[in-house]
Image (tube, rainbow, N blue to C red):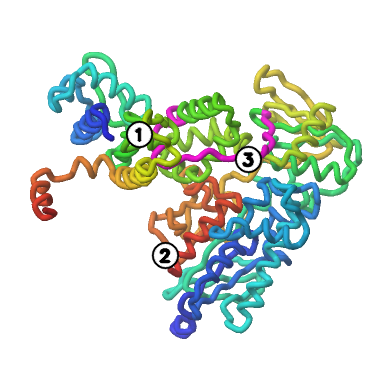
Protein backbone atom coordinates (compact mmCIF):
# COMPACT_ATOMS: atom_id res chain seq x y z
CA UNK A 1 0.00 0.00 0.00
CA UNK A 2 1.57 3.25 -1.07
CA UNK A 3 1.10 5.86 1.64
CA UNK A 4 0.78 9.59 1.06
CA UNK A 5 4.36 9.87 2.20
CA UNK A 6 5.51 7.45 -0.46
CA UNK A 7 3.49 9.17 -3.14
CA UNK A 8 4.74 12.64 -2.21
CA UNK A 9 8.31 11.39 -2.12
CA UNK A 10 8.05 9.93 -5.60
CA UNK A 11 6.46 13.12 -6.94
CA UNK A 12 9.25 15.19 -5.43
CA UNK A 13 11.86 12.94 -6.99
CA UNK A 14 10.20 13.15 -10.40
CA UNK A 15 10.26 16.93 -9.98
CA UNK A 16 14.02 16.78 -9.31
CA UNK A 17 14.55 14.31 -12.16
CA UNK A 18 13.13 16.87 -14.61
CA UNK A 19 15.80 19.43 -13.75
CA UNK A 20 19.13 19.65 -15.58
CA UNK A 21 21.75 17.52 -13.80
CA UNK A 22 23.14 19.22 -10.70
CA UNK A 23 20.58 22.03 -10.55
CA UNK A 24 19.06 22.59 -7.13
CA UNK A 25 15.33 23.04 -6.45
CA UNK A 26 13.77 24.96 -3.57
CA UNK A 27 11.60 22.91 -1.23
CA UNK A 28 8.88 25.56 -1.58
CA UNK A 29 8.84 25.17 -5.37
CA UNK A 30 8.65 21.39 -5.19
CA UNK A 31 5.84 21.63 -2.62
CA UNK A 32 3.71 24.12 -4.49
CA UNK A 33 4.35 22.50 -7.86
CA UNK A 34 3.06 19.13 -6.65
CA UNK A 35 0.46 20.08 -4.03
CA UNK A 36 2.52 18.70 -1.15
CA UNK A 37 2.39 20.28 2.35
CA UNK A 38 5.82 21.90 2.78
CA UNK A 39 6.48 20.68 6.33
CA UNK A 40 5.71 17.12 5.33
CA UNK A 41 7.96 17.49 2.29
CA UNK A 42 10.82 18.71 4.50
CA UNK A 43 10.60 15.50 6.52
CA UNK A 44 10.35 13.32 3.41
CA UNK A 45 13.34 14.93 1.73
CA UNK A 46 15.32 14.52 4.95
CA UNK A 47 14.69 10.77 4.87
CA UNK A 48 15.58 10.57 1.18
CA UNK A 49 18.82 12.38 1.95
CA UNK A 50 19.69 9.92 4.74
CA UNK A 51 19.17 7.04 2.33
CA UNK A 52 21.40 8.69 -0.28
CA UNK A 53 18.85 9.48 -2.99
CA UNK A 54 19.04 13.29 -2.76
CA UNK A 55 21.63 15.86 -1.72
CA UNK A 56 20.91 19.17 -0.13
CA UNK A 57 22.66 22.50 0.18
CA UNK A 58 21.84 25.00 2.88
CA UNK A 59 21.54 28.76 2.62
CA UNK A 60 19.94 31.27 0.27
CA UNK A 61 21.05 29.38 -2.83
CA UNK A 62 20.25 26.06 -1.16
CA UNK A 63 17.84 23.33 -2.11
CA UNK A 64 17.68 19.70 -3.17
CA UNK A 65 18.91 17.72 -6.13
CA UNK A 66 19.23 14.03 -7.01
CA UNK A 67 22.34 12.42 -5.55
CA UNK A 68 22.56 10.02 -8.49
CA UNK A 69 21.34 9.98 -12.10
CA UNK A 70 17.60 9.29 -12.34
CA UNK A 71 18.17 6.08 -14.30
CA UNK A 72 20.16 4.64 -11.39
CA UNK A 73 17.42 5.13 -8.79
CA UNK A 74 14.75 2.45 -8.74
CA UNK A 75 11.21 3.30 -7.67
CA UNK A 76 11.07 0.28 -5.36
CA UNK A 77 14.19 1.44 -3.54
CA UNK A 78 12.57 4.78 -2.75
CA UNK A 79 9.27 3.29 -1.61
CA UNK A 80 11.02 0.92 0.85
CA UNK A 81 12.81 3.87 2.44
CA UNK A 82 9.67 5.96 2.83
CA UNK A 83 7.01 3.32 3.50
CA UNK A 84 9.04 0.40 4.84
CA UNK A 85 8.78 -3.14 3.46
CA UNK A 86 6.70 -3.39 0.32
CA UNK A 87 3.41 -4.93 1.43
CA UNK A 88 -0.20 -4.76 0.29
CA UNK A 89 -1.44 -5.21 3.88
CA UNK A 90 0.49 -4.70 7.14
CA UNK A 91 0.59 -8.40 8.06
CA UNK A 92 2.30 -9.31 4.77
CA UNK A 93 5.79 -8.31 5.86
CA UNK A 94 8.54 -10.37 7.43
CA UNK A 95 10.47 -7.65 9.21
CA UNK A 96 7.80 -5.17 10.27
CA UNK A 97 5.14 -7.77 10.71
CA UNK A 98 1.96 -6.46 12.27
CA UNK A 99 -0.37 -9.14 13.51
CA UNK A 100 -4.01 -8.78 12.61
CA UNK A 101 -6.19 -8.79 15.72
CA UNK A 102 -8.86 -10.85 14.10
CA UNK A 103 -7.02 -13.75 12.45
CA UNK A 104 -4.40 -16.46 12.80
CA UNK A 105 -1.50 -15.71 10.48
CA UNK A 106 -0.50 -19.38 10.10
CA UNK A 107 -3.83 -20.35 8.58
CA UNK A 108 -4.84 -17.05 6.97
CA UNK A 109 -5.10 -17.63 3.22
CA UNK A 110 -5.37 -13.92 2.59
CA UNK A 111 -1.97 -13.31 4.13
CA UNK A 112 -0.42 -16.14 2.11
CA UNK A 113 -1.67 -14.69 -1.12
CA UNK A 114 -0.61 -11.20 -0.12
CA UNK A 115 2.93 -12.47 0.53
CA UNK A 116 2.93 -13.53 -3.09
CA UNK A 117 1.50 -10.21 -4.19
CA UNK A 118 4.35 -8.32 -2.52
CA UNK A 119 6.87 -10.28 -4.60
CA UNK A 120 5.06 -9.06 -7.69
CA UNK A 121 5.05 -5.50 -6.35
CA UNK A 122 8.82 -5.72 -5.78
CA UNK A 123 9.37 -7.09 -9.26
CA UNK A 124 7.56 -4.16 -10.88
CA UNK A 125 8.91 -1.38 -8.68
CA UNK A 126 12.50 -2.67 -8.66
CA UNK A 127 12.56 -2.84 -12.46
CA UNK A 128 11.41 0.73 -12.98
CA UNK A 129 13.85 3.58 -12.63
CA UNK A 130 12.97 7.11 -11.63
CA UNK A 131 13.85 8.19 -15.17
CA UNK A 132 11.36 5.72 -16.63
CA UNK A 133 8.64 6.91 -14.26
CA UNK A 134 9.41 10.54 -15.18
CA UNK A 135 9.12 9.74 -18.89
CA UNK A 136 5.76 8.00 -18.71
CA UNK A 137 3.76 10.03 -21.19
CA UNK A 138 0.64 11.23 -19.45
CA UNK A 139 -1.35 11.80 -22.63
CA UNK A 140 -0.94 8.14 -23.55
CA UNK A 141 -2.44 6.98 -20.29
CA UNK A 142 -6.14 7.42 -21.10
CA UNK A 143 -5.54 5.72 -24.43
CA UNK A 144 -3.88 2.77 -22.75
CA UNK A 145 -6.79 2.49 -20.36
CA UNK A 146 -9.23 2.56 -23.26
CA UNK A 147 -7.35 -0.22 -25.01
CA UNK A 148 -7.41 -2.32 -21.88
CA UNK A 149 -11.10 -1.74 -21.37
CA UNK B 1 40.49 -20.04 -40.90
CA UNK B 2 37.45 -21.35 -42.79
CA UNK B 3 38.47 -24.94 -42.16
CA UNK B 4 38.65 -24.38 -38.47
CA UNK B 5 35.33 -22.58 -38.41
CA UNK B 6 33.69 -25.52 -40.11
CA UNK B 7 35.06 -27.94 -37.58
CA UNK B 8 33.35 -26.16 -34.70
CA UNK B 9 30.54 -28.25 -33.32
CA UNK B 10 27.42 -26.36 -32.25
CA UNK B 11 26.94 -25.92 -28.52
CA UNK B 12 30.58 -26.53 -27.71
CA UNK B 13 31.81 -24.98 -24.50
CA UNK B 14 35.30 -24.94 -23.04
CA UNK B 15 35.65 -24.49 -19.29
CA UNK B 16 39.07 -23.10 -18.44
CA UNK B 17 39.83 -24.31 -14.91
CA UNK B 18 38.76 -27.69 -13.57
CA UNK B 19 38.61 -26.84 -9.88
CA UNK B 20 35.39 -26.87 -7.89
CA UNK B 21 33.70 -24.11 -9.95
CA UNK B 22 34.64 -25.77 -13.25
CA UNK B 23 33.34 -29.19 -12.19
CA UNK B 24 30.13 -27.70 -10.80
CA UNK B 25 29.56 -25.83 -14.06
CA UNK B 26 30.27 -28.94 -16.17
CA UNK B 27 27.81 -30.94 -14.06
CA UNK B 28 25.08 -28.35 -14.62
CA UNK B 29 25.76 -28.03 -18.36
CA UNK B 30 25.60 -31.80 -18.80
CA UNK B 31 22.11 -31.87 -17.33
CA UNK B 32 21.00 -30.63 -20.74
CA UNK B 33 19.61 -33.43 -22.93
CA UNK B 34 21.15 -31.83 -26.05
CA UNK B 35 23.07 -34.66 -27.82
CA UNK B 36 25.26 -32.16 -29.70
CA UNK B 37 26.57 -30.53 -26.54
CA UNK B 38 30.36 -30.68 -26.14
CA UNK B 39 31.89 -29.70 -22.82
CA UNK B 40 35.67 -29.53 -22.54
CA UNK B 41 37.10 -29.10 -19.06
CA UNK B 42 40.74 -28.00 -18.85
CA UNK B 43 42.73 -28.26 -15.62
CA UNK B 44 46.46 -27.91 -15.10
CA UNK B 45 46.58 -29.74 -11.76
CA UNK B 46 46.71 -33.54 -11.79
CA UNK B 47 43.31 -33.79 -10.12
CA UNK B 48 40.03 -32.28 -11.22
CA UNK B 49 37.67 -30.76 -8.70
CA UNK B 50 40.29 -29.72 -6.16
CA UNK B 51 41.63 -26.35 -7.22
CA UNK B 52 43.23 -24.50 -4.35
CA UNK B 53 40.33 -24.83 -1.96
CA UNK B 54 40.03 -28.59 -1.79
CA UNK B 55 43.58 -29.77 -2.44
CA UNK B 56 44.53 -29.86 1.25
CA UNK B 57 45.02 -33.34 2.68
CA UNK B 58 44.96 -32.14 6.28
CA UNK B 59 41.98 -33.60 8.12
CA UNK B 60 41.82 -30.51 10.36
CA UNK B 61 41.12 -28.41 7.26
CA UNK B 62 37.38 -28.82 7.29
CA UNK B 63 34.76 -27.07 5.19
CA UNK B 64 33.64 -23.70 6.49
CA UNK B 65 30.06 -24.52 5.45
CA UNK B 66 28.20 -27.47 6.98
CA UNK B 67 27.66 -30.53 4.78
CA UNK B 68 23.97 -29.73 4.38
CA UNK B 69 24.90 -26.65 2.32
CA UNK B 70 27.62 -28.12 0.11
CA UNK B 71 25.77 -29.98 -2.64
CA UNK B 72 27.22 -29.40 -6.11
CA UNK B 73 23.69 -29.09 -7.52
CA UNK B 74 21.49 -26.03 -7.09
CA UNK B 75 18.29 -28.05 -7.50
CA UNK B 76 19.36 -30.87 -5.15
CA UNK B 77 20.72 -29.23 -1.98
CA UNK B 78 20.97 -32.55 -0.10
CA UNK B 79 23.25 -34.22 -2.64
CA UNK B 80 26.51 -33.98 -0.67
CA UNK B 81 24.86 -34.83 2.63
CA UNK B 82 23.33 -38.00 1.15
CA UNK B 83 26.69 -38.88 -0.37
CA UNK B 84 28.29 -38.66 3.10
CA UNK B 85 25.54 -40.75 4.69
CA UNK B 86 25.65 -43.40 1.94
CA UNK B 87 29.37 -43.90 2.47
CA UNK B 88 29.12 -43.98 6.25
CA UNK B 89 31.22 -40.80 6.49
CA UNK B 90 28.58 -39.15 8.68
CA UNK B 91 25.43 -40.11 10.52
CA UNK B 92 22.26 -38.07 10.59
CA UNK B 93 22.58 -37.54 14.36
CA UNK B 94 25.88 -35.72 13.86
CA UNK B 95 24.45 -32.77 11.91
CA UNK B 96 25.71 -30.13 11.40
CA UNK B 97 28.84 -31.83 10.05
CA UNK B 98 31.88 -29.90 8.85
CA UNK B 99 33.55 -32.44 6.61
CA UNK B 100 37.27 -32.38 5.79
CA UNK B 101 37.93 -30.57 2.51
CA UNK B 102 39.75 -33.66 1.20
CA UNK B 103 36.46 -35.54 1.56
CA UNK B 104 34.73 -32.83 -0.45
CA UNK B 105 37.41 -33.17 -3.14
CA UNK B 106 36.59 -36.89 -3.26
CA UNK B 107 32.90 -36.06 -3.65
CA UNK B 108 33.61 -33.81 -6.63
CA UNK B 109 35.99 -36.38 -8.12
CA UNK B 110 33.39 -39.15 -7.89
CA UNK B 111 30.78 -36.83 -9.33
CA UNK B 112 33.03 -36.10 -12.30
CA UNK B 113 33.98 -39.79 -12.66
CA UNK B 114 30.30 -40.65 -12.89
CA UNK B 115 29.68 -37.95 -15.48
CA UNK B 116 32.67 -39.18 -17.47
CA UNK B 117 31.41 -42.75 -17.41
CA UNK B 118 27.90 -41.66 -18.33
CA UNK B 119 29.07 -39.50 -21.21
CA UNK B 120 31.74 -41.89 -22.54
CA UNK B 121 29.54 -43.06 -25.40
CA UNK B 122 27.97 -39.68 -26.10
CA UNK B 123 31.31 -37.87 -26.32
CA UNK B 124 29.74 -34.87 -24.63
CA UNK B 125 32.47 -34.50 -21.98
CA UNK B 126 36.17 -34.18 -22.60
CA UNK B 127 38.75 -33.70 -19.86
CA UNK B 128 42.15 -32.19 -20.65
CA UNK B 129 44.96 -32.14 -18.11
CA UNK B 130 47.02 -29.22 -19.33
CA UNK B 131 47.71 -25.60 -18.55
CA UNK B 132 45.75 -23.05 -20.56
CA UNK B 133 47.80 -20.11 -21.79
CA UNK B 134 45.31 -17.83 -23.51
CA UNK B 135 41.84 -17.49 -24.96
CA UNK B 136 41.34 -15.79 -28.31
CA UNK B 137 38.11 -15.00 -30.11
CA UNK B 138 37.87 -16.39 -33.65
CA UNK B 139 35.25 -15.50 -36.26
CA UNK B 140 33.11 -18.43 -35.22
CA UNK B 141 33.97 -18.94 -31.59
CA UNK B 142 37.02 -19.13 -29.37
CA UNK B 143 40.38 -20.82 -29.39
CA UNK B 144 42.15 -21.81 -26.17
CA UNK B 145 45.92 -22.21 -26.49
CA UNK B 146 47.45 -24.87 -24.27
CA UNK B 147 50.94 -25.11 -22.80
CA UNK B 148 51.71 -28.23 -24.86
CA UNK B 149 51.49 -26.17 -28.05
CA UNK B 150 48.10 -27.41 -29.19
CA UNK B 151 44.81 -25.59 -29.00
CA UNK B 152 41.13 -26.35 -28.55
CA UNK B 153 38.27 -24.56 -30.25
CA UNK B 154 34.65 -24.12 -29.26
CA UNK B 155 31.71 -21.78 -29.54
CA UNK B 156 32.47 -20.18 -26.24
CA UNK B 157 34.77 -20.36 -23.26
CA UNK B 158 33.98 -19.95 -19.60
CA UNK B 159 36.75 -18.91 -17.24
CA UNK B 160 36.63 -20.77 -13.94
CA UNK B 161 40.16 -20.17 -12.75
CA UNK B 162 39.18 -19.29 -9.20
CA UNK B 163 41.54 -17.74 -6.71
CA UNK B 164 45.02 -16.54 -7.36
CA UNK B 165 47.81 -18.94 -6.46
CA UNK B 166 50.48 -16.35 -5.76
CA UNK B 167 50.61 -13.75 -2.96
CA UNK B 168 49.30 -10.33 -3.90
CA UNK B 169 51.62 -7.60 -5.07
CA UNK B 170 53.03 -5.50 -2.25
CA UNK B 171 53.11 -8.43 0.18
CA UNK B 172 56.88 -8.25 -0.07
CA UNK B 173 58.50 -11.24 1.54
CA UNK B 174 55.29 -13.06 2.36
CA UNK B 175 54.74 -16.48 0.83
CA UNK B 176 51.74 -18.71 0.44
CA UNK B 177 51.49 -21.68 2.72
CA UNK B 178 52.10 -24.94 0.89
CA UNK B 179 53.94 -23.25 -1.98
CA UNK B 180 57.48 -24.23 -3.01
CA UNK B 181 58.93 -21.42 -0.92
CA UNK B 182 57.27 -22.90 2.15
CA UNK B 183 60.37 -24.87 3.24
CA UNK B 184 60.66 -26.63 6.64
CA UNK B 185 60.81 -24.36 9.68
CA UNK B 186 62.44 -24.86 13.09
CA UNK B 187 59.68 -25.91 15.54
CA UNK B 188 60.25 -22.88 17.78
CA UNK B 189 60.64 -20.33 14.99
CA UNK B 190 58.40 -17.27 15.37
CA UNK B 191 56.05 -16.77 12.45
CA UNK B 192 54.19 -13.73 11.17
CA UNK B 193 50.90 -14.28 9.39
CA UNK B 194 49.45 -11.39 7.38
CA UNK B 195 45.72 -11.70 7.88
CA UNK B 196 43.50 -12.85 10.74
CA UNK B 197 40.66 -14.50 8.81
CA UNK B 198 39.88 -18.04 7.77
CA UNK B 199 43.11 -18.35 5.73
CA UNK B 200 45.11 -17.53 8.87
CA UNK B 201 43.19 -20.24 10.71
CA UNK B 202 44.11 -22.72 7.96
CA UNK B 203 47.75 -21.70 8.26
CA UNK B 204 47.67 -22.17 12.04
CA UNK B 205 46.17 -25.66 11.66
CA UNK B 206 48.87 -26.58 9.12
CA UNK B 207 51.62 -25.33 11.41
CA UNK B 208 50.19 -27.35 14.29
CA UNK B 209 50.13 -30.43 12.10
CA UNK B 210 53.78 -29.91 11.19
CA UNK B 211 54.76 -29.83 14.85
CA UNK B 212 55.48 -26.10 14.89
CA UNK B 213 55.31 -24.62 18.40
CA UNK B 214 56.62 -21.04 18.05
CA UNK B 215 54.58 -17.90 18.43
CA UNK B 216 52.29 -16.97 15.56
CA UNK B 217 51.66 -13.24 15.24
CA UNK B 218 48.49 -12.72 13.19
CA UNK B 219 48.33 -9.19 11.81
CA UNK B 220 45.51 -7.40 10.06
CA UNK B 221 44.15 -3.86 9.94
CA UNK B 222 41.60 -4.60 12.64
CA UNK B 223 42.91 -7.85 14.14
CA UNK B 224 39.45 -9.45 14.04
CA UNK B 225 39.11 -13.23 14.25
CA UNK B 226 36.20 -15.06 12.58
CA UNK B 227 33.20 -16.19 14.63
CA UNK B 228 32.09 -19.81 15.10
CA UNK B 229 29.10 -21.48 13.52
CA UNK B 230 26.19 -22.45 15.70
CA UNK B 231 23.23 -24.64 14.91
CA UNK B 232 20.31 -22.47 13.93
CA UNK B 233 17.59 -21.59 11.49
CA UNK B 234 18.08 -18.62 9.16
CA UNK B 235 15.24 -16.10 9.47
CA UNK B 236 12.89 -15.78 6.53
CA UNK B 237 13.12 -12.60 4.47
CA UNK B 238 11.68 -11.49 1.14
CA UNK B 239 13.25 -9.05 -1.24
CA UNK B 240 10.31 -6.74 -0.47
CA UNK B 241 11.64 -6.41 3.10
CA UNK B 242 15.17 -5.33 2.22
CA UNK B 243 16.14 -1.74 1.48
CA UNK B 244 18.00 -1.82 -1.84
CA UNK B 245 19.98 0.87 -3.59
CA UNK B 246 20.51 3.09 -0.55
CA UNK B 247 23.65 4.61 0.84
CA UNK B 248 25.75 2.16 2.88
CA UNK B 249 25.09 3.84 6.24
CA UNK B 250 21.34 3.55 5.73
CA UNK B 251 21.58 -0.14 4.94
CA UNK B 252 23.91 -0.88 7.86
CA UNK B 253 21.51 0.97 10.19
CA UNK B 254 18.61 -1.13 8.92
CA UNK B 255 20.58 -4.33 9.34
CA UNK B 256 21.71 -3.50 12.87
CA UNK B 257 18.09 -2.74 13.82
CA UNK B 258 17.00 -6.03 12.30
CA UNK B 259 19.54 -7.94 14.38
CA UNK B 260 18.51 -6.02 17.50
CA UNK B 261 14.82 -6.77 16.95
CA UNK B 262 15.51 -10.44 16.38
CA UNK B 263 17.77 -10.73 19.40
CA UNK B 264 14.95 -9.34 21.52
CA UNK B 265 12.92 -12.27 20.28
CA UNK B 266 15.72 -14.62 21.30
CA UNK B 267 17.07 -15.17 17.78
CA UNK B 268 20.84 -15.48 17.30
CA UNK B 269 22.55 -12.92 15.06
CA UNK B 270 23.82 -15.77 12.88
CA UNK B 271 20.28 -16.58 11.85
CA UNK B 272 19.81 -12.97 10.72
CA UNK B 273 23.13 -12.88 8.82
CA UNK B 274 22.29 -16.21 7.17
CA UNK B 275 18.73 -15.10 6.44
CA UNK B 276 20.13 -12.27 4.34
CA UNK B 277 22.35 -14.59 2.31
CA UNK B 278 19.91 -15.34 -0.53
CA UNK B 279 19.77 -11.59 -1.20
CA UNK B 280 23.43 -10.66 -0.81
CA UNK B 281 24.11 -10.54 -4.55
CA UNK B 282 20.99 -8.49 -5.16
CA UNK B 283 21.93 -6.07 -2.38
CA UNK B 284 25.43 -5.69 -3.80
CA UNK B 285 24.25 -5.20 -7.38
CA UNK B 286 21.77 -2.51 -6.38
CA UNK B 287 24.19 -0.45 -4.35
CA UNK B 288 25.56 2.73 -5.92
CA UNK B 289 29.29 2.60 -6.66
CA UNK B 290 30.00 4.75 -3.59
CA UNK B 291 28.28 2.26 -1.27
CA UNK B 292 30.23 -0.64 -2.77
CA UNK B 293 33.51 1.18 -2.32
CA UNK B 294 32.71 2.15 1.27
CA UNK B 295 31.65 -1.38 2.08
CA UNK B 296 34.91 -2.85 0.80
CA UNK B 297 36.98 -0.24 2.63
CA UNK B 298 35.21 0.00 5.96
CA UNK B 299 32.53 -2.61 6.54
CA UNK B 300 33.78 -5.74 4.82
CA UNK B 301 36.17 -6.72 7.65
CA UNK B 302 33.26 -6.72 10.11
CA UNK B 303 30.94 -8.42 7.71
CA UNK B 304 33.47 -11.16 6.94
CA UNK B 305 33.99 -12.30 10.53
CA UNK B 306 30.24 -12.65 11.02
CA UNK B 307 29.40 -14.03 7.64
CA UNK B 308 32.36 -16.35 6.97
CA UNK B 309 32.49 -18.43 10.11
CA UNK B 310 34.38 -21.52 11.15
CA UNK B 311 33.35 -24.92 12.43
CA UNK B 312 32.82 -24.93 16.25
CA UNK B 313 35.65 -27.47 16.80
CA UNK B 314 38.08 -25.29 14.85
CA UNK B 315 36.97 -22.22 16.77
CA UNK B 316 37.70 -24.06 20.04
CA UNK B 317 41.27 -24.75 18.91
CA UNK B 318 41.85 -21.18 17.78
CA UNK B 319 40.42 -19.74 20.99
CA UNK B 320 42.66 -22.01 23.04
CA UNK B 321 45.68 -20.97 20.96
CA UNK B 322 44.90 -17.28 21.51
CA UNK B 323 44.43 -17.76 25.25
CA UNK B 324 47.71 -19.64 25.65
CA UNK B 325 49.56 -17.02 23.59
CA UNK B 326 50.37 -19.33 20.69
CA UNK B 327 48.44 -17.05 18.35
CA UNK B 328 48.78 -13.33 19.00
CA UNK B 329 46.27 -11.29 17.00
CA UNK B 330 47.50 -7.75 16.30
CA UNK B 331 45.53 -4.87 14.81
CA UNK B 332 47.97 -2.77 12.85
CA UNK B 333 50.10 -2.57 9.75
CA UNK B 334 53.59 -3.45 8.61
CA UNK B 335 55.76 -0.32 8.41
CA UNK B 336 59.06 -1.88 7.40
CA UNK B 337 60.70 -5.25 6.90
CA UNK B 338 64.46 -5.79 7.22
CA UNK B 339 65.90 -9.00 5.86
CA UNK B 340 68.68 -10.60 7.89
CA UNK B 341 69.04 -14.05 9.36
CA UNK B 342 65.32 -13.70 9.98
CA UNK B 343 62.90 -10.93 9.10
CA UNK B 344 62.80 -7.94 11.39
CA UNK B 345 59.35 -6.49 11.02
CA UNK B 346 58.24 -3.10 12.28
CA UNK B 347 54.53 -3.03 13.04
CA UNK B 348 52.43 0.00 13.93
CA UNK B 349 49.49 -0.65 16.23
CA UNK B 350 46.13 0.54 14.90
CA UNK B 351 44.97 1.87 18.25
CA UNK B 352 48.04 3.13 20.14
CA UNK B 353 50.05 4.03 16.98
CA UNK B 354 53.08 2.67 18.85
CA UNK B 355 55.75 0.91 16.84
CA UNK B 356 56.65 -2.65 17.74
CA UNK B 357 59.55 -4.63 16.32
CA UNK B 358 59.21 -8.34 15.95
CA UNK B 359 61.34 -11.14 14.57
CA UNK B 360 59.86 -13.69 12.22
CA UNK B 361 61.52 -16.63 10.51
CA UNK B 362 58.71 -16.77 7.99
CA UNK B 363 55.96 -14.45 6.77
CA UNK B 364 52.83 -16.09 5.41
CA UNK B 365 50.40 -14.27 3.16
CA UNK B 366 46.88 -15.00 4.41
CA UNK B 367 45.43 -11.64 3.44
CA UNK B 368 42.60 -13.48 1.83
CA UNK B 369 41.24 -13.91 -1.57
CA UNK B 370 40.28 -10.42 -2.63
CA UNK B 371 43.05 -8.63 -4.47
CA UNK B 372 43.71 -6.51 -7.53
CA UNK B 373 42.93 -8.71 -10.52
CA UNK B 374 45.20 -6.78 -12.87
CA UNK B 375 48.23 -8.11 -10.96
CA UNK B 376 47.04 -11.72 -11.15
CA UNK B 377 49.54 -14.52 -11.60
CA UNK B 378 47.07 -16.35 -13.82
CA UNK B 379 48.36 -16.11 -17.40
CA UNK B 380 44.99 -16.61 -19.10
CA UNK B 381 43.35 -13.81 -17.15
CA UNK B 382 46.32 -11.50 -17.52
CA UNK B 383 46.56 -12.03 -21.26
CA UNK B 384 42.87 -11.23 -21.64
CA UNK B 385 43.32 -7.98 -19.73
CA UNK B 386 46.56 -7.13 -21.60
CA UNK B 387 44.86 -7.55 -24.98
CA UNK B 388 41.84 -5.49 -23.92
CA UNK B 389 39.51 -8.49 -24.16
CA UNK B 390 38.73 -8.15 -20.47
CA UNK B 391 39.03 -5.43 -17.86
CA UNK B 392 38.99 -5.29 -14.07
CA UNK B 393 35.69 -4.30 -12.46
CA UNK B 394 35.60 -0.76 -11.00
CA UNK B 395 36.73 -1.98 -7.56
CA UNK B 396 39.32 -4.34 -9.05
CA UNK B 397 37.95 -7.31 -7.13
CA UNK B 398 37.71 -9.42 -10.25
CA UNK B 399 36.92 -9.16 -13.93
CA UNK B 400 34.16 -6.85 -15.12
CA UNK B 401 31.26 -9.11 -16.12
CA UNK B 402 27.57 -8.63 -16.81
CA UNK B 403 24.89 -10.17 -14.60
CA UNK B 404 24.87 -12.92 -17.25
CA UNK B 405 28.55 -13.73 -16.58
CA UNK B 406 29.74 -12.27 -19.92
CA UNK B 407 33.14 -10.60 -19.93
CA UNK B 408 33.19 -6.86 -20.59
CA UNK B 409 36.11 -5.84 -22.80
CA UNK B 410 38.42 -2.89 -22.22
CA UNK B 411 36.27 -0.74 -24.54
CA UNK B 412 33.07 -1.65 -22.71
CA UNK B 413 31.82 -4.11 -25.32
CA UNK B 414 30.11 -7.20 -23.90
CA UNK B 415 31.57 -10.48 -25.10
CA UNK B 416 29.18 -13.19 -26.23
CA UNK B 417 31.98 -15.73 -26.42
CA UNK B 418 34.04 -15.42 -23.26
CA UNK B 419 32.35 -15.74 -19.89
CA UNK B 420 33.41 -16.30 -16.30
CA UNK B 421 32.08 -17.97 -13.16
CA UNK B 422 33.18 -18.17 -9.54
CA UNK B 423 35.51 -15.84 -7.65
CA UNK B 424 36.61 -14.06 -10.85
CA UNK B 425 33.14 -12.50 -11.01
CA UNK B 426 33.32 -11.02 -7.52
CA UNK B 427 32.97 -7.45 -8.75
CA UNK B 428 29.47 -8.21 -10.08
CA UNK B 429 28.29 -11.03 -7.79
CA UNK B 430 30.31 -10.15 -4.69
CA UNK B 431 29.66 -13.28 -2.63
CA UNK B 432 30.72 -15.88 -5.10
CA UNK B 433 33.51 -17.75 -3.33
CA UNK B 434 31.53 -20.58 -1.79
CA UNK B 435 29.80 -23.58 -3.34
CA UNK B 436 26.25 -22.56 -2.27
CA UNK B 437 26.60 -19.39 -4.36
CA UNK B 438 28.68 -20.81 -7.20
CA UNK B 439 26.24 -23.65 -7.87
CA UNK B 440 23.36 -21.19 -8.25
CA UNK B 441 25.43 -19.08 -10.65
CA UNK B 442 26.35 -22.19 -12.68
CA UNK B 443 22.73 -23.39 -12.78
CA UNK B 444 21.53 -20.02 -14.09
CA UNK B 445 24.31 -19.80 -16.66
CA UNK B 446 23.63 -23.34 -17.91
CA UNK B 447 19.96 -22.57 -18.28
CA UNK B 448 20.71 -19.38 -20.16
CA UNK B 449 23.20 -21.02 -22.51
CA UNK B 450 21.41 -24.30 -23.14
CA UNK B 451 17.81 -23.60 -22.16
Q: Is residue B315 above or below residue B28?
A: above
Q: Chain of mark 2?
A: B
**Label pair 1/2, CB-CB below 8 angstroms:** no
The residue indicated by pointer 1 is A80
Mark 2 or 3: in front is 3
Q: CA distance from mark 1 to mark 2?
A: 36 Å
Mark 3 or 1: in front is 1
Instruction: Judge if badges 3 and 1 mark residues of a common chain.
Output: no
Q: Does residue B97 appear in the picture of this structure?
A: yes
Q: Is residue B22 above or below residue B320?
A: below
Residue at the location (10% across, 55% down)? A147
Q: Is residue B79 above or below residue B224?
A: below
Q: CA distance from mark 3 to mark 1?
A: 28 Å
Quadrant in the picture for residue B351: top right
Image coordinates for residue B151, horizontal then vertical, percent: 58, 75
Neighbourhood count class around disc 3 (C-alpha, 10 Å): few under 14, some 14–19, many 20 upward: some
Q: What numbered label is drawn on residue B416?
A: 2
Instruction: Judge if badges 1 and 2 mark residues of a common chain.
Output: no
Left or right: residue B361 versus residue B71 is right
Magenta residue check for B239 = yes
Q: Main secondary structure of the magenta part?
A: loop
The residue indicated by pointer 3 is B308
Quadrant in the picture for residue B350: top right
Q: Does residue B243 appear in the picture of this structure?
A: no
Residue at the location (13% across, 26% down)? A33
Q: What numbered label is drawn on residue B444?
A: none
Amino acid sequence: MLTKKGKYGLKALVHLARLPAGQLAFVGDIASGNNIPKKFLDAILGELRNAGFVQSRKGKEGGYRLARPADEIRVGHVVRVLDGPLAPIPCASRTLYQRCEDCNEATCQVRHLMLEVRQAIAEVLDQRSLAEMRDIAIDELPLALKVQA
Amino acid sequence: MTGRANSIIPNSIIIVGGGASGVVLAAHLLKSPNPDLRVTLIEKRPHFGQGMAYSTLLSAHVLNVSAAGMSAYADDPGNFWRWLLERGLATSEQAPVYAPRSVYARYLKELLDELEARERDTGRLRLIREESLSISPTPSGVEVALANGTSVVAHLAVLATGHDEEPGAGQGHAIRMGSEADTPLAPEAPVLVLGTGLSMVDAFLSLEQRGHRGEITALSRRGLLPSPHRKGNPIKLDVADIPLGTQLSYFVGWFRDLIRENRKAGIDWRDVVDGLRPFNQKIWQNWPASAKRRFVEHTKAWWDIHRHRMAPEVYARVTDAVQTGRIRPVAGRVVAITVGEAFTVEVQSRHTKRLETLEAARIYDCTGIARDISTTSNSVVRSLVDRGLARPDPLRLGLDVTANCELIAGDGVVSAKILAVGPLTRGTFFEIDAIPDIRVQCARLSKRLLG
